Amino acid sequence: MNNPILEVQGLSTTFHRGGVTLPALRDVSFNVGKGEVLGLVGESGSGKSVTLRSVLGLARRYGEVTGQVRWQGQDLTGLSEREMRHIRGREIAMIFQEPMTSLNPLLTVGRQLTETLKAHTDLNRRARKDRAIEMLDLVGIPAAASRLSDYPHQFSGGMRQRVMIAIALAVGPQLLLADEPTTALDVTIQAQILDLILKLSQDMDMGVILVTHDLGVVAQTCDRVAVMYAGRIVEQGAVRQVLKGPRHPYTVGLMQSVPEGVAPRTQLYSVPGTPPSLAALPQGCAFAPRCAFVSGPCAAQRPELESVGEGRELACFHPVEALDGVASKAGAHPASSPHMTEESAA
Amino acid sequence: MASIQYILKRLALMVPTFFLVMVIIFLLVRFLPGDPATAIAGDRASDADLAAIRDRLGLNEPMWVQFWLFLTNTLQGDLGRSILMRTEVVDVIFDRLPTTAFLTLYAVGLSIAIAGPLAFVAALNRGRWPDNLIRTVFQVGLSMPVFYIGLVLLTFLGAQLRWFPVGGYGEGFWSHMYHLFLPSVTVALYTSAIIMRNLRSAIIEVLDAEYVQFARAKGLPDRLILGRHVLRNALISTVTLLGLSIGNLMSGTLVTETVFAVPGLGRLMLEAIFARDYPLIQGLTLTFAVLVSLVFLLTDLFQSSLDPRMRLS
Amino acid sequence: MSEVTVNTTSNAPKRMTRARLALAKPGFLLGCAIIGISTLLALFPQVFAPYDPNFIDYLAVRQPPSWAHPFGTDSLGRDAFSRVIHAYSVNMQMAVLATVFALVIGVVVGALVGYYRGIADMIFGRVVDAVITFPFLVLVIAVVAVLGPGLINMYIAITMVGWVYYARLMRAEVIAQMGNDYAAAGLVMGYSDRRIIFRHLLPNAITPVVIYWMTDMALAILLGSSLGYLGLGAQPPQAEWGVLIAEGRNFITTAWWLSLMPGIAIVLTGLGFSLIGDGLADLLRPRG
């Protein structure tokens, strides 16, 4: 990776709720290069969404954010809300998981598109409208010009997600934060939306951080991947390397839950156990209670994220060497509920 | 805008409701101990009066015929004669209606003026001291009996300081505004407590809504997010809440009119009850029901004109 | 940012249960304290009141507050403090008797129509529409007008109107719970309707009803004292806060304490019930 546009260093986000301290994000570091697609994977509650919101300065409204978010050399965490507004939507855009609830039901799609343009460009009314039509057209909405005056509820779920992408990309950002953009959509639509994001990223030379809990999606779309567990990154590296030879037992578990090349009617694997509560994280490795390779030091001490060569980083005392050996060990627990795999069937 | 079709459909839905409303009002007086005719005509009625009432209500006929008579009479605008006022119930009610309508609208206006901004301040400062202060004050306000608030305002601002009249309605708009100020404040203090509480959570819900997060992620200025995205949605909640609280508001109006001697429907209702003026009680009960359902209807129409999802294509 | 699950296997140094959280809320504790003390006063007024509330002393009429008479005396020379204390019996009784029958009827009817739906539910829907079309107070005083003023008739009137609100809430909850898996599981297991309704649906659906009940008790005191004030509820010489305020209203400039003290009592108990209601809502309602 040459010349990262986004460098995140030691990002930690803490929420306080009713006297309980929730360390939602701890010491997260990663980079995104120009035009690069980074996948952020993990179970729900692992801190993927919080990472995106912390980068964009949306999380500090609800909690305490420390660390550095260097955007083209400038640290965003120190910026005022006013300065941050010039970054949001203009340089870094974000799209959300639920296209049903992420568009304001009371405003026309055209209005929601042009208000972004108005906030960030000098275009006049006419030009904004032209640009809005152009964007809707770009994301594949038929008869774009006639749909500007429609309300969100007049669009299907997939179309709304396209609208959201059009709004996010209207000003031509250099980085797109996509928070599970396809989770709420039908399987057939999911692929279309991912293709659209990928294509636009290539055309506009725009970096993407794609949050997903689906390694299948990562394999298809991302250049690099970071695996998150309980608010920390436990493994990251180039997609091809990580998926070919996962080193962290949790990554291995996630991979085994992807139903690829599985004979029909065999039980799907899912990582046994549940993620720990953020309010009661274990002292050592957070994954230890669910890990098949757990030993003494795992419970007592937290493994740090360290470079293991070839641009890969890993936080584990017992890195997995080869996939074969793991499958027999960790794969001994058939899933009682194929929860994760059902969603990732795409 | 709401279509004619929608309005017609909404009106059609009111028919069975009003049928039941009529049944309830009809049954109310049938539960009277003793002879309804005597009760309705009053103790000093002559035999001829009693016979006339029996005839009009069909008291010798089976129950359903009596109900039919009551229904058709009412639909023709005949609610009987008031014992207390010695005139047609309909006339008495139409005479007093404007006062109560004025008071109610006045109180609605004041409630919004009090609750709206404070709900916004509380929601935007959720969990911090302005929020806690506002909520505590309104929590106490919610537990305050309307008649006591009225009594205190009446005595100190009215009787002692003489800033406001201690009763009556006045002549002309500004005189009404002046005379009904304290009564409206009394009603509004109570209703604004209900509205504030619900509006605060509605605004918080909107503030946390994904579309507001998205608007923020788009880099819109706060002013625009609040003014365009939050306010508009919160307005719908406010109108809905006000519509739903209209029953509470009218209950408050009833008590307040009594405390301040405002010549409206509520005070009339109490007078009718103490005079055992059953035709008037029936007529007033019906009038209140009609007023409430009118407000429900208006709320619905207003809501559907604001919310594109409710518009019929 | 989804619901945080509590892991039972991990050692949790600062883990707090929901119950502890609710107890730690000062509002909930305050509410419990107010209602606890109010209940004591209501049960044993003679222990706390220095005088007989109806003892008339023409030699000590409308005295200002003093050590002998902390809230002064009224126009008949009765001790205002003793009357406010004795009124606790009536007003606390109101909170219970004006709501509990409505609660029981409403829960049963609501559960049944919510479970069976069909024609009964349609009729119920119309009844609800019709009843909420009347302002609550108007319908209650119309019923009181027919039955005649007095406490018992007031309870009957409030119950006749109030059950509808409980039933509506209960019905909605039961229907929501029916959508959950365990109700469907019960059906598949072939449990009897009665068992499903009373053993499975009811305990789960009742939470919002109980929370509403607390608010409703506060409202019952407000409503009961309003009716007392208007002369339709408790009748003088009975000591009841609404009646006391009505008795004191003519002397509000000269002897303001006569109406202020019962007013404070109303606000305090109402506040107590709603604080408990809020606390219960935090305690019982799952939150995301």
Image: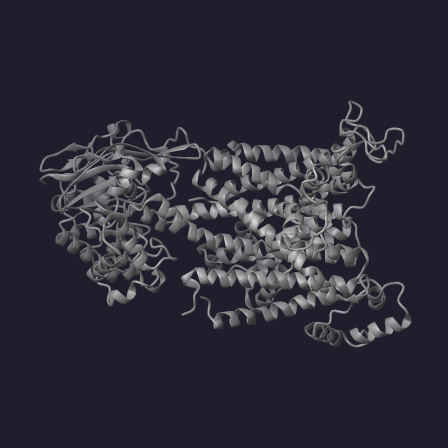
Residue under the point 34% across and 64% down: A154
Q: Position of residue A133 (x, y in %)?
A: 23, 61
Q: Nearer the viewer, residue C3 or A105?
A: A105
Q: Left or right: B276 with respect to A19?
A: right
The N terminus of chain C sits in image quarter: top left
In the image, residue B301 above or below residue B270: below
The C terminus of chain C sits in image quarter: top left
In the image, residue B98 above or below residue B143: below
Q: Nearer the viewer, residue A230 or A116?
A: A116
Residue under the point 56% across and 61% down: B296
Q: Left or right: B130 with respect to C86?
A: left
Q: Quadrant of residue A231?
A: top left
Q: Nearer the viewer, residue C183 or A165?
A: A165
Q: Is residue C136 visible?
A: yes
Q: Position of residue B111 (x, y in %)?
A: 56, 48
Residue under the point 35% across and 51% down: B211
Q: Nearer the viewer, residue C262 or B106?
A: B106
Q: Position of residue B7 (x, y in %)?
A: 51, 69
Q: Is residue A212 visible?
A: no
